Amino acid sequence: MPGFRRTALAGLAATMLLAVGGTPAAGDRPAYRDPALPVPDRVDDLMARMSLDDKLGQMVQIERKAADPQAVADHRIGSVLSGGGSAPEPNTAEAWADMYDDYQRAALATPLGIPVIYGVDAVHGHNNVHGATIFPHNIGLGAAGNPELVRKIGAATAKEVAATGIDWTFAPCVCVARDERWGRTYEAFGEKPENASAMTTAVTGIQGEKLGADPTSILATAKHYVGDGGTTGGDDQGNTEISEEELRATHLPPFREAIARGVGSVMISYSSWNGEKLHASRYLVNDVLKGELGFSGLVVSDYDAIDKIDGQEDFTPDEVRAAVNAGIDMIMMSDRHGKFLDYLRAEVESGRVPMERIDDANRRILTKKFELGLFERPFAQRDLLPGVGSAEHRELARQAVRESQVLLRNDGVLPLAKDGGKIFVAGKNADDIGNQSGGWTISWQGSSGDITEGTTILEGIRATAAGSEVTYDRHGNGIDGSYRAAIAVVGETPYAEYEGDRPDGLELDEEDRATIAKLRESGVPVVVVTVSGRPLDIAGEVDGWNALLAAWLPGSEGQGVADVLFGDHNPSGKLPATWMRSFDQLPINDGDGQEPLFPYGFGLSYRSGPAASESHTNEKDWPRQDTHGLGTA
Ligand code: GLC
């Protein structure tokens, strides 16, 4: 194996260290294998036994497609990830558990038997896995404004992830989305730091009150540090050109809150701050995150992010050194782990990367592995497999969908009666579970179509209005005046990251506009439901709609949208992002002096009697501020 020197000398050195450095074994078991010992002692003992190559390998997180279990073991690689959609074949929970266990068995067969830690983006459920529960994306949860609900979603997600063996989710994103042109707006809980800060209850849900105390506890990640949602023009991976005062006031608070909740890892942002790449910022990573904020967990890079420090493809020794010396402990990479290890070894042997930095990174990584219980419980928790996509989790997801709906306009047509007469449903997003789930679902970008199990919005409408005749035509063909109402479910199709950047506009597409026009020509009251990752540019059309419901990206349980349309849930959601009056206003945020179409915090509800709806924009309890650390709203 190129550059990887595993020699008898290393084995001899380990033995000598055992004599002088390692803690005496209790019986024939080395101290680091004794769960009764304090974690710091176990870390000390293990590190005293590790060679330089053992330590360097722990700092690599490799994509599964680039290294099979034996390669991971041979290079002593400490972590594996599945990038978005990187699934075993078949893509079943059982096959994930088998894949995970294969990596773990190979790792445990190495001399020191250090288990791998495996990470995925379970950002709205265990969303890579077919049949898993898909929860609303964060912008919808921000609209719901319920931290306790978010904690429960984190816990349910962790159970489904742990069932497949996976130990680590790269969630929650605690970004603060300041410009809706950004393709990751839906991954944010809202436009203000308090939206994300309130929802760091996700950390408590994912990890539990104490990391590893429960078998379903997995490692959470606060991401992306720091300022990813504040780039100029909403340019994903772009440049956040703001003062340090604004960076600290707007983008830092959710990380403080996540750290206070014990988040075990932080992921660094691809973006730059005033021209300096975050991945090379010793000030923001080492001095502020680790020093000032006291973060003691592990800092992981973003995917192949060190390649981009110098703006050129591939990574160089300088970039490896810059990232590690900035304070990044684990480098996430698609491939080229051998080259990385060679570069890092040379940097250490030359003294350009101090051994203390390598030891600090290893201490942080190994501490999380011990705390998670990976040495004692290294394999998938297969008894949890029945919980993947369970009715209980789907009911929780449905409740989250209900609470995330924001009613923006209603002339009294809503709530619809469940019985009598005919209802017409149209729109490309009415009967498409892929579209209603959005990006990061089964594949990285997500996709239209019947991509996983669940209930479409149309299926929910049909189930609720069982006493009515419900007709569906995607384009509205067949509508006439005999229908009592028409529902147009429109909006965006799936995207993720920079693929979702919209520097040129956020209007409804031509198909949606034609569909709505056809419905309106019939004279039937039209209810528009937007399925989107962000506010859209609709000011020019909204006056012709009888009602408007923002559904965001509800995920697998479309029934929750029908629950609101037919009044089984009184809409309670409120805008976590200011809704533009014009695209030209962007960025538009609460308090910036611009006149929006709908303000931050706006949301209507149903009221009995003639005033069908009234705004409760300024309700004091939204978003509900969780009492820090208690995990209850
Ligand atoms: C992506 C994203 C990050 C994700 C990581 C692993 O590029 O920026 O949010 O966790 O890579 O998939």
Image (cartoon, grey):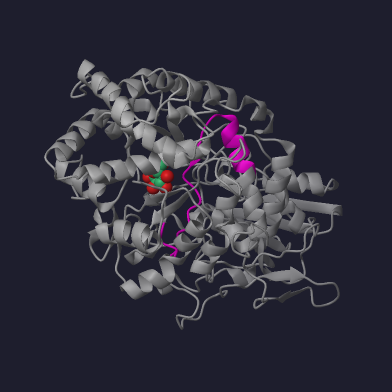
**Viewer-side residue, 302 vs 49:** 49
Query: Which residue is pictured at 31% across the width and 71% down the height?
Result: 242
Residue range highlighted in magenta:
156-182
Residue 288, above or below 132 = below
Residue 521, above or below 207 = below
Q: Position of residue 505 (x, y in %)?
A: 41, 62
Q: Is 567 positioned to the left or the right of 578 in the image?
A: right
From this viewpoint, is residue 175 visible?
A: yes
Task: Label the magenta part by its dominant secondary structure.
Answer: loop
Query: Which residue is pictured at 45% across the width and 33% down the height?
Result: 118
Image quarter of residue 177 = bottom left
Residue 187, above or below 21 = below
Q: Is residue 75 magenta?
A: no
Query: Which residue is pictured at 37% across the width and 26% down the height?
Result: 65
Q: Position of residue 228 (x, y in %)?
A: 38, 59
Image quarter of residue 414 = bottom right
Q: Position of residue 624 (x, y in %)?
A: 64, 67
Number of callouts in the render?
0
Quarter of the C terminus within the rendering: bottom right
Q: Is 74 positioned to the left or the right of 478 in the image?
A: left
**Viewer-side residue, 367 vs 262:** 367
**Viewer-side residue, 550 vs 127:** 127
Quarter of the N terminus within the rendering: top left
From this viewpoint, is residue 499 visible?
A: no
Q: Is residue 166 magenta?
A: yes
Quadrant for ligand 1 reads: top left
Q: Is 600 positioned to the left or the right of 298 in the image?
A: right
Q: Residue furthest left?
A: 350
Q: Position of residue 423 (x, y in %)?
A: 77, 52
Residue 292, above or below 335 = below
